[in-house]
Image (cartoon, rainbow, N blue to C red):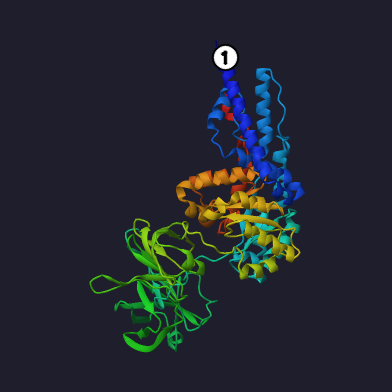
Amino acid sequence: MKSRPKSRQLDRVKSQLLTLIHDAIRMEDSYADELQRIEPSYRNSARNFLHYLGIRQRDIRALQHDLASLGLSSLGVLEPHVMASLNSAIDVIEQLTGNEHQDLREAPVDYRTGPLLLRDHARALLGPEPQGRYVRIMVTMPSEAATNPHLVQDLLLAGMDVMRINCAHDGPEQWTAMVENLRKAERVVGRSCHVQADLAGPKLRTGSIGSSGKVVRVKPRRDTFGRVTEAGRIWITSSLDNDHQPVTTGFVLCIDGPLVEAAIPGDRIEFIDTRDQAHHIDVVEVLEKGGCVGEIGRTAYLEEGCKLSLVRDGVDVVSGQLFDVPETIQPILLLPGDLLILTRNNLPGCHEIRDANGKVTRPARIHCTLETAFEQVKPGQSVWFDDGKIGGIVKDNDGENIAVQVTHTGPNGAKLRAEKGINFPDSNLETAALTDKDLADLAEVCRYVDMVALSFLRGPEDVERLHDELYRLDCSHLGVVLKIENRQAFKNLPRVLLASLNSPPVGVMIARGDLAVEMGFERLSEVQEEILWLCEAAHVPVIWATQILEGMAKGGAPSRAEVSDAAMSIHAECAMLNKGPRIVETVRFLSGIIGRMDDHYSKRRATLRKLAVARL
C-alpha cells in the first residue's frame, strides 16, 4: 500500500524533470545562430545559460518539494551546471524505478567544470585570486591617488585587487598618474592589481544652483546646551596666500588696506553683520607673516564688502573692507507637495519665491542635464533625486520644463544639491550609453587599463557598440564590465549577457544605488539575487557595488547593517569600495570579513567547516 504512492510520486517527478529538459533543449535550439557567434571558449557557458533561461520560465517549487522529500537534490543551486543537474536527478529516479535513462542532450558542463569556468572567467577579467580569499576587492580612486603614491601602496598592501578609475572625475593626466603610482607600488609590494576605467555615460544629474551671495559665518564653539566653551579663532590677513595660517584658527577673513598691518594685541575690530547686529573681534596675537589672530564670542555673518574698523582705546584707528569671500550655495529645500521645475535651459537653479502672504509665486527650478528627458518623459511618471532621498511625480512636460510635484522626502524635508543623480524609472529613455566624452576617454584609457565599465547601458546594442569601438582602437582584448543600474538594463539582461559573450572577458556590476531607485527599494534584494543567478548560469563574474562599508570609509566605524551587507559580497566575485578618508582601514577590514566567510560559503552554497562552538 505504501509503495504505490511513492511510485506515482516518482513518475510525476520524472515527467516534470523531462519537461524541464525539453524546455532547456528548446531554448538552446532556438538560439543556435546566436551561439555560433559566441567566442568558442565561452560557448558551453552560453549553452548552460540558455538551459537556465529555459527552465526558469516555469514555477518548479512543487517539483523541488517532491525532490527534497525523496532525499534528492532540490535543484536549488543548479546555475553553473543546469543540464548535468537535471540528468543526474533523472538518473537517480530511473535507478529507484529500475529503468534506464538515456540523456536527451549531453550536458555542456558538469559539476566540476561549471564552477571552474566561472573561476577561470573571473581570473581573465579581474586577475588572479588573492591569497586567503576568493572575492576580489575593487577600490575607487580619490583624486589624491594621482599625487600620493604612498596612498596607492597602502591600498595595495591592505588588499586592493582592482583599482577603479571613475572617468566622471579628474582627467587623463590624473588617471595616468594613478596607474603609474600603482605600477610602482606593485613592484614594491610584490602583488599585481588590475585597473578598471568606468566611462561616465550619459549624464542625468541636476545642474548648478545660483549663489545666495558671498557670506562667511564665524562662530565660537558651544556645548550641548548652547553655552560658549571656546571663542572662535580667526586668521585675519590682507593677503590671498594663507600658507601661514595658524592651525589653531578655524576661520579666515581677508581685509584690504592697512588695517591688518596696524593691528596690535588688545585692539578690537568692530563691524555690523548681515543681520544688522554689532560685533567685535578681539586681536590676541600678531604674527610676523603678515597676519593676526582674533577671537570672537558670538556668531556673526559677514558679506563681501563689509566695513570693519580697527578700534584702540575707544578710538577708530583705521578701517578696511572684507574681500575674497567664497560664494554661498544654499541647497534647495523641498517638502511634500512642493513643485519643482526641471529646466532644459542650463541656467543656475534657484529657490522658490513667496509673496508677503507666503504664497508661492515662482516654484524652485534646477537644470536637468539629459536632453532626452525633455523629449520622452511623460506626466504621471515618477522621478527620484539623489539616490532616492527625494521623490516626485511628473505633472507636466512642455519640452522645455518638466514640472515635478514632490511626494517623498525625509520628515523635515530634504535638500537638493547640484550634481545629484536623477532617475526616471518609469520612462523608457532612448539614449546611447556611449557619449562623445566617453569615446574620447576610451581612446585615452584603453592604453593602460585592463577593463572598461559601460555605464547606463540599456540593451545589447550598447554592448555591441562598445565592442566595435574597442576593436577600432585595437583594444578588443580588454575586459568589459556591464553596469546594471536601470530598469531597462535589468529587463534586457539575458540578451545583454549573450551579446557580451561574443567578445569576452566580461563581468557584471550590480550598481545597487541607482538600481534600488529604478526598481524600488523593496525589490532590490530580489533583483540583485536574480542578477547573481543569471550571471552564475552564464559563468560571468559579478562585482557587488555601492555603499559597501561606506560609514567606515567616511567616518571610521561601520554599522552592524554594513558589516552584514559586506558579508553578502561573498556571493559575488568582487566587492567594490568607494573612496573615503578611512579607505585603507576599510579595505583591510573587508578583506578580513571576506576571508572568514570564504570558509563557510562557496557562492550561495553553505560549506560545513568544523565549528569550534559545536563542542559540548
Q: Residue at x 33, y 84 (%)?
A: 313
Q: Amino acid at mark 1?
A: Arg
Q: Residue at x 34, y 88 (%)?
A: 316
Residue most toward the top? 1
> Which quadrant of the rendered structure holds the N terminus?
top right
Image height of 245 relative to 498, above or below: below
Which residue is disc 1 drawn over?
A: 4
Image height of 386 relative to 18, above or below: below
Residue most toward the left? 357
* Residue 494 in sight here: yes
Q: Position of residue 573 (x, y in %)?
A: 64, 47
Would you call the spot at circle 1 few (<14 residues within 10 Å), some (14-19), or many (20 or more)? Answer: few
> Which quadrant of the rendered structure holds the C terminus?
top right
In the image, 270 versus 50, the foreground residue is 50
In the image, 578 versus 94, the foreground residue is 94
Q: Residue at x 59, y 45 (%)?
A: 532
Q: Position of residue 278 (x, y in %)?
A: 30, 78
* Residue 127 in sight here: no
Left or right position of 29 against 317: right
Residue 115 lies in quadrant: top right
Number of numbered callouts drawn = 1
Image height of 259 relative to 142, above or below: below
Q: Position of residue 299 (x, y in %)?
A: 35, 71
